[in-house]
Amino acid sequence: MLKLNHLRSLPNLMSDQLHTLPLLVLYLTDGCNSKCAMCDIWKAPRRNMDLGLVERLAASSQKLGTQLVLLSGGEAMQHPEWPSIAQQFRAAGSKIWLLTNGLLLRKQADEVIAHVDTLTVSLDAATPELYAKIRGVDGLDLILEGMRIISEAGIPISTRTTLMRANFRQMPQIVDRALWAGARQVSFLAVDTVNPFAFGPRFEQDDMIPLNVPVNEFGGLTADDLPEFGAMLDELEHTHAAQFADGRIAESPAKLRRLYDYFAEPLGLGEFEGPRCNAPHISAVVNWDGRLQPCYFLPSWGKLNGDGVALEDALNDPAAVALRTAYRNGERAECARCVCPLYRGPRALIRGF
């Protein structure tokens, strides 16, 4: 039988007002124990979400019919109270999705097994040397060991790889290492090189930076890289046909080839069609300090302070509605090159997260 909350979400797709919030994303902390070359968030001092704010959000999530709460950061597992936070949202009726770099998985395996429904691990290399180069820490073997422990306990694990010049050649090996460690699904997305709102204060500008950003190992591909990337995608489709067929590789071969277009467009060697996305109509992001965003990649419209304003009211603040209207009308430049879109049509909303 369909859950009432799932049906209540359908009106979200018909206007720019939110009636429910199927997915709630929490940045529990802006601290991180990685030192990624393509992200600046680890350079900030660690600041954790206040437990009073957590309590208010858990109460709001129940009223909003939130089905899934994504714990993120920074590194969510660095918040000292993340297990109790997960338990609060579970008690309010939500499932818990943990997004992590995986460095603490082995140490906190018992807590993950007890408090998490699904786990996504960032996995950007197949060899310890390249992992350390990209992530700034020597942690690959530790991560894979933690994944195996948690997978053997029955927690579904997926991995997410950020593709860049440094690692695109390892795509087949990354798939193999992830599946060996117990992942049920492997996903790839392109490195973001243009958005000033995601992954820490990387740019001084308030608006989008130009597409002709400097290219380095941790950024977009060059014209010389593209033929090799195309051949790599052809090879992956051939050697891993079974993994594509049964969904262990999340994207289809055709969808992965959109990554080629993404990297080719700023070089004048291709055309990238913006992704289909309605994330601001089905989700919201709350930062550690209460700042509110429609998604990872759009700017904040406000902040939950200690003034008693509830999330269910803030979601339909005029500024929030204006942001939804703008992205729906194609007026937000960030959406044209979004690397991590989320789309749920009516049938998917009814099925639920």
Image (tube, rainbow, N blue to C red):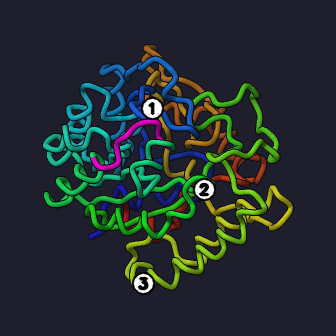
Local packing at callout 1 (Cα closer than 10 Å; few below 14, some 14-19, many 20+) is many
Q: Which residue is mark 2?
A: 190
Looking at the rendered structure, the secondary structure element under dot 3 is helix
Query: Please, what is the three-letter code of the amino acid marked with disc 1?
Result: Leu
Residue, x 70% and y 54% (percent of image)? 337
Query: Please, what is the three-letter code of the amino acid marked with disc 2?
Result: Ala
Disc with the residue nearer the chain's start (1 vs 3): 3
| Tags 2 and 1 touching, CB below 8 Å | no
Residues drawn in magenta: 134-141
Q: Which residue is mark 3?
A: 245
Quarter containing the C terminus: bottom left
Local packing at callout 3 (Cα closer than 10 Å; few below 14, some 14-19, many 20+) is few
Q: Which residue is mark 1?
A: 311
| Tags 3 and 2 touching, CB below 8 Å | no
- The picture places residue 163, in percent across and down from the top left corner, at 57, 56
- The picture places residue 90, in percent across and down from the top left corner, at 23, 43
Camera sees residue 69:
no
Residue, x 37% and y 21% (percent of image)? 48
Disc with the residue nearer the chain's start (2 vs 1): 2
Looking at the rendered structure, the secondary structure element under dot 2 is strand
Question: Which residue is more in the foreground, 109 or 54?
Answer: 109
Residue, x 47% and y 49% (percent of image)? 130
Decide: is 96 above or below 152: above
| Tags 1 and 3 touching, CB below 8 Å | no
Looking at the rendered structure, the secondary structure element under dot 1 is helix
Q: Is residue 91 left or right of residue 41?
A: left
Residue, x 40% and y 39% (percent of image)? 72
Decide: is 195 above or below 327: above
Q: CA distance from mark 2 to mark 1?
A: 31 Å
Disc with the residue nearer the chain's start (3 vs 2): 2
Question: Which residue is more in the foreground, 103 or 223?
Answer: 223
- The picture places residue 97, in percent across and down from the top left corner, at 33, 49
